[in-house]
Amino acid sequence: MSRNDWEVVIGLEIHAQLNTASKIFSAASTAFGAEPNVQASAVDIALPGVLPVLNGGAVERAIRFGVAIGATVAPKSVFARKNYFYPDLPKGYQISQFELPVVQGGAITIRVGDGDKAYEKTVQLTRAHLEEDAGKSLHEDFHGMSGIDLNRAGTPLLEIVSEPDMRSSTEAVAYARALHALVRWIDICDGNMQEGSFRCDANVSVRRPGGPLGTRREIKNLNSFRFLQQAIDFEVQWQIDTIEDGGRIQQATVLFDPDTGETRMMRSKEDAHDYRYFPDPDLLPLVISPEWIARVRSEMPELPGAMKARLVDDYGLSAYDAASLTASKEIAAYYQAMLAAADAKPGSQVPKLGANWVMGELAAQLNRAERDIGDSPVAPAQLAGLVQRIADGTISNNIARKVFAALWNGEGGTGPDAADRIIEAQGLRQVNDSSALEPLIDEVLAANQKSVDEFRAGKDKAFNALVGQVMKASRGKANPAQVNEMLKRKLEA
């Protein structure tokens, strides 16, 4: 049977580490990279008689997330004990939320794919709840034993649970990327996947189209978008092959091995009753007032969806361009700073030209140099000055690339006048004077009679060759639009 005979059903559980300075129930530091077990307090290692104290900063970040996704922020939520054998969580249970999570519902709209085949889809969220992270088991450095590092134990997490709304690994990755961008945008998580700040668990099942949901398997701790896609694709094919060969899917927790590209079973999957949840007697219910929510809402930055709509409505950008420019907090900040430095007005060329340069030449150079946009040698104000000179006809796009290269290399100084200084110093100003262009065009026509005859015989390519010759004669400084117009006029005379 074909894979098209099956429908894939995917839901994601994402653990976002909240960027508080201290842990969720203790004053121990959350800084990454410390020596093992130097950031584990008496609360974290569960010494007798200690009591947890809730970190208000973690709660505020959960509220911020709830507001950002249009969810209900529960006026009252409850912490529970999730009983489970954790070798790296000394008290033997995890403090989490079960029946009454702090964030309920909400949705995120994602853009899937590129070009003409791209489409938007809204993924509903079930909940987001606060919980503590476990420590870390270390196997590589110990022969026949495991070491335990409790520095991470008690680090605040927001576990974000989606509905099973995704139907392919491509959709799952698009959702994970959108969520990753959002938690960084609203500054609740640094999103560093290599350090474990943003981890994905994927619940995957297959079914006949329109049939009942199949048995799911949960792929744990995926720490890159590439691994997320590879793991889901392998798991989907494995489940289809198993069922078609007469086998049965058992609910399980599985791990993905990046070296083999395969998933393997770790343990049978537990249900909620296996964890024996009950309210934590050491923590009072979490009560969040309407005033607290209102204050957080008033302090929120403009969200990616709102900025995207504004760029389309105010500046006439395409939905694709607007989505690309709001794909990350840093790209959006750079583009906004560029618009501000150029004093860009709706209806002007600057917003579209600026978008092209940010997504094109700048992105390509940053990629080649393996640099982030926040570390760009070309500042937003410098790019604004360059884009303005393209818009007003001072330089062409081709000449602008020479100016950009000079800016990248540190020439021209700082500020919006940097491009002007390079243009003047290198004599790059575009020739717009028809009296200066006319003799050049006449010389080219006289020296290229064959191309003239071919154009008049109906060969359009010959015209492009003549334009190229004029641009060469002007050392690239002739206004291309003016050259086209004057050449046509002379050839058709």
Image (cartoon, rainbow, N blue to C red):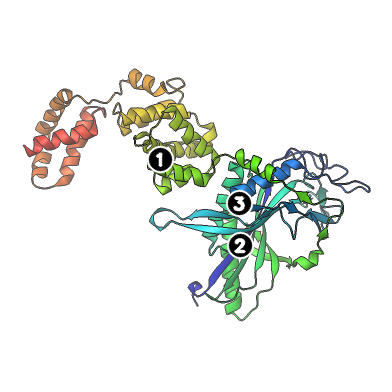
Q: Quadrant of residue 487?
A: top left
Decide: marks 1, 2 in contact (CB < 8 A)? no
Please tell me which of labels 1 and 2 falls first in the chain.
2
Crowd band around label 1 with a 10 angstrom C-alpha radius: few (<14), some (14–19), many (20+) = few
Disc marking residue 163: 2
Mark 1 secondary-structure assignment: helix
Query: Does any portion of residue 16 appear in the rendered image?
Result: yes
Please tell me which of labels 2 and 3 falls first in the chain.
2
Badge 1 amino acid: Asp
Q: Which residue is mark 1?
A: 314
Badge 3 amino acid: Ser
Instruction: Calculate the distance from the C-alpha at mark 1 to the C-alpha at mark 3.
Output: 35 Å
Decide: marks 1, 3 in contact (CB < 8 A)? no
Crowd band around label 2 with a 10 angstrom C-alpha radius: few (<14), some (14–19), many (20+) = some
Q: Which residue is mark 3?
A: 224
Nearer the camera: disc 2 or disc 3: 2
Classify 258 as above or below 434.
below
Task: Tell whether 258 sits left or right of 383.
Answer: right
Crowd band around label 3 with a 10 angstrom C-alpha radius: few (<14), some (14–19), many (20+) = some
- State which quarter of the image contains the C terminus: top left
Q: Which residue corresponds to the image point at 70% horizontal and 68% vertical from the top-left? A: 252
Please tell me which of labels 1 and 3 falls first in the chain.
3
